[in-house]
């Protein structure tokens, strides 16, 4: 596909999302999650509360919330996670994903299928798709 053929309304979120979901409980410490992110080379982990995915912790949360609130490394991720989880359906266009990220001022969306979270799409995924 050449750049002239690129139409972000025809490419679906499900075509470019990351299917691997890594999650932790709200009691997991910010240090434990930081180590997971470092070792896995990932920028976000979903957070479960009562067996329900209710938030996300991102590399940006570390940069802005831990230092700003002078939290220790043993603080639970619940204190810095972003919640509620902002989602997009897998059959929506990547253009819709970009619009949602822009309007919410975020870089990661949980992807759903009939209300169940099945993956993540990031701004990096969108840029990667655009550059093909």
Image (spheres, rainbow, N blue to C red):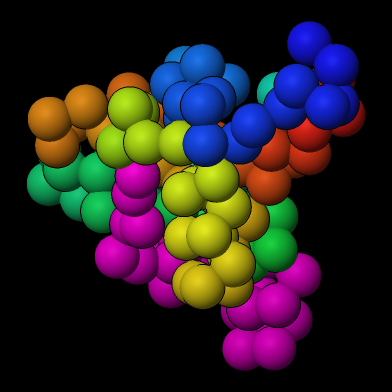
Residue 131 seen: yes
Q: Which residues are magenta?
A: 62-88
Q: Is residue 77 visible?
A: no
> Which residue is drawn at the image coordinates 49% and 72% (left, top)?
104
| Image vertical order of residue 61 relative to residue 4, above or below | below
Asked whether 28 or 107 is in front, the reply is 107
Image: 101 above or below 12: below
Is 32 situated left or right of 110 in this image? right
- Quarter of the image where the C terminus is located: top right
Q: Label the magenta part by its dominant secondary structure.
A: loop
At x 85%, y 16%, the residue is 2
Please state the horizontal and vertical placement of residue 89, each as a whole percent of the image: 30, 37
Say which of 131 and 24 sits in front.
Answer: 131
Residue 86 in magenta stretch: yes
Q: Is 74 positioned to the left or the right of 88 in the image?
A: right
In the image: residue 6, left or right of residue 82: right
Name the residue furthest top. Answer: 1
Foreground of the two, 91 or 115? 91
Q: Residue at x 21, y 50 (%)?
A: 49
Write down the quadrant of residue 21 in the picture. top left
- The location of residue 119, given as percent across then percent down, is 42, 27
Decide: is 63 above or below 9: below
Image x and y of residue 124, in percent:
75, 39
* In the image, farthest residue toward the front: 4
Up/down of 60 relative to 20, above or below: below
At x 78%, y 11%, the residue is: 1
Queried whether the magenta region covers residue 40, the answer comes back as: no
Query: Which quadrant of the view contains residue 72?
Result: bottom right
């Amino acid at each position: 596909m050449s750049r002239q053929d690129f139409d972000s309304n025809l490419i679906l979120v499900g075509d470019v999302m990351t299917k691997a979901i890594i999650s932790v409980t709200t009691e997991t410490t910010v240090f434990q999650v930081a180590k997971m992110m470092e070792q896995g080379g990932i920028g976000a982990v979903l957070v479960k509360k009562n067996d329900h995915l209710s938030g996300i912790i991102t590399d940006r949360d570390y940069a802005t919330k831990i230092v700003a609130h002078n939290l220790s490394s043993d603080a639970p991720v619940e204190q810095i996670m972003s919640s509620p989880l902002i989602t997009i359906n897998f059959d929506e266009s990547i253009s819709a994903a970009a619009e949602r990220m822009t309007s919410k001022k975020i870089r990661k969306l949980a992807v759903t299928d009939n209300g169940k979270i099945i993956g993540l799409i990031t701004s990096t995924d969108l840029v990667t798709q655009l550059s093909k």
